[in-house]
Image (tube, rainbow, N blue to C red):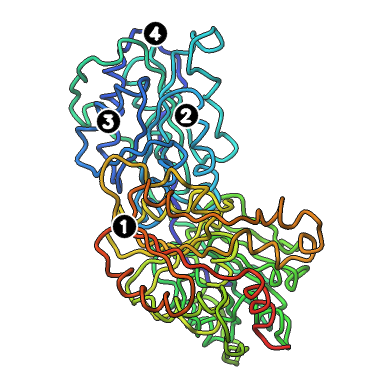
Amino acid sequence: MRPRRRVGRDRAKTSDARKRFTRVNTSSAQLAALLRDRLALRAWSGWVASPGSRCAPLIMAFQELPLRSQVVLDERSAAHWALGAAIATGTPAFAVCTSGTAALNYGPAVAEAFYQQVPLLVITADRPAALIDNGHGQSIRQTRIFDDHLVGKGLLDCEAPLEWNAAVIDQALEALKYGPVHLNVPLAEPLYEAVAPLAAGSLGVQSSTVEPMPLEIPDFVRHAKRPLLVVGQWNPSWGDPEPAVRELARKGWMIAAEPLSQLPHDAAEHLEDTLPMLRAEPDAVVTLGGPWVAKKAKAALAGTPHWAIGPREPLPDMFGALRARTHAEHFAALTALAELAPALGQVFTQNQITAKEVVGWSDLKLHSTIAKAIPAGWDVHWANSTPVRYANFLWGQGRFSRGIRHFSNRGASGIDGMTSTALGAMWATQRPTLLVTGELGFLYDGGAGIAYEALPALKVLVVNNQGGQIFQWLDGPRASSQLERHFAFRHARSVRSSAENQGFTYRSARDEAEFRRDWEAFVNDSAATVLEVYTDPDASETAWKGRFGA
């Protein structure tokens, strides 16, 4: 009989909130107080609001919660602040906004939370249902705007009894552990009444239970001679993956990862640079964790029998050969796999490709210098486009100290929301935090720092290579007549005015000597600070493409 390890999976047990009810008039103050009291029964890393009128009862109620809060003008940025808080702490955060198009601005953060499996709650105020499509301002059909990217939803009703609404709230929040949840709250005027006091817990608490479930290794994995485990993006709150990964390596498993796995570089093959060059091709692949960057690895593993493990759908068929899927918590499944996997009579040894020494000032030289200089114990957020790819490369070269936590919005995002995410993360954790981003990404998220309270002392290193450098790496855009105008968006702008407008202290460096001169003062500044470093796009392209030699 095959050994099996029982791992936990949450299953919410809730009452049916869709039962019929006798309609009543529930005031906005009562509904807001009810929601406040249901939220007070759970742990939160904080909440973020944006100015608005329809959400006034919610704001007045939530002020009584003993939680950190922030007001961010732009709802798009506010949602990313809450996203960052939830990512960095592993504890849910929520954002609350007024009705209408304000709610639509939460969409990018909700989508990222869905694919990155982040416990983000978004609360949208709404007009009563009878007023929608009847000519009233700031009203849209907002009850289903996020549906394709949610794990839970609760539609409150201002004509329903409090007990019914309490059940709706609790049932929706039970799903929060696995991703984003939306609560839509219709609020009728008057909106500025004193919040009605309701004793927390007076309506009862519906709690989830953990039902053990077995983890059984599929036959095609159990009998594989060269099994490969790919560890994707890993939230530190899930648990430390290194001990189980080391045990699997001792048993002869191949391991592949990127820095977002939170593994040290010597624990795994580099997904992008060394995995596609293995002499012995894997005959089975197991994926755990969230998304990963490497395209070459996905192509190299095409057709390999695949077992996908994760707490919920979607479990992607990345290689066109998905043979088994298992719903289980990441850390519990990894621990069980390390215990149950048979020893293969071999020990995994890591391959290494050594890059040539970087000469001349370029994006690669800058990132290489940063990687060596980041202090242990820092959190680093890598923006999409080139920064996260430089981080991947340098992790494979062993350039980072142990004890650095790596983050990036790799679930679904482009260059949007990274400054806001990093601000929210540091705001919630108070850990020293660095964001490495491009100038276009920083300009795009220009509302990130327009907040009411002082910004956390985030350090933002802006790599200004005068456009979208990544498009110079790609053959298609590189050969197009529209490279500079449409793809790379070539420009001569600085981020200085945007940074200072948001409340950041601003510094700049135009070469390696100036960068080295400013680095220590930059990381030790007690204020939120931007260091804009200029590089040459053509020199950067040459350095990147020649990093392994001719």
Question: Which label lies toward us, 1 or 4?
Answer: 1
Q: Residue at x 40, y 79 (%)?
A: 516
* Up/down of 486 relative to 19, above or below: below
Q: Is residue 318 left or right of residue 199?
A: right
* Gap in angstroms between the C-alphas marked 4 and 2: 32 Å
In front: 78, or 73? Answer: 73
Residue indicated by mark 2 = 102
Q: Upstream in the sequence, badge 1 or badge 2? A: 2
Residue 263: mark in rendering = none
* Up/down of 190 relative to 206, above or below: above
Q: Upstream in the sequence, badge 3 or badge 2? A: 3
Identify the secondary structure beneath mark 4.
Answer: loop
* Gap in angstroms between the C-alphas marked 1 and 4: 53 Å
Identify the secondary structure beneath mark 2.
Answer: helix
How many neighbours does mark 4 have within 10 angstroms: few (below 14), some (14-19), or many (20 or more)? few
Residue 528: mark in rendering = 1
Whole-percent x, y for residue 191 in the image: 30, 15
The answer to which image quadrant residue 354 occupies is bottom right
* Gap in angstroms between the C-alphas marked 4 and 3: 24 Å
Residue indicated by mark 3 = 36
Q: Looking at the picture, which amino acid does disc 1 mark?
A: Ala
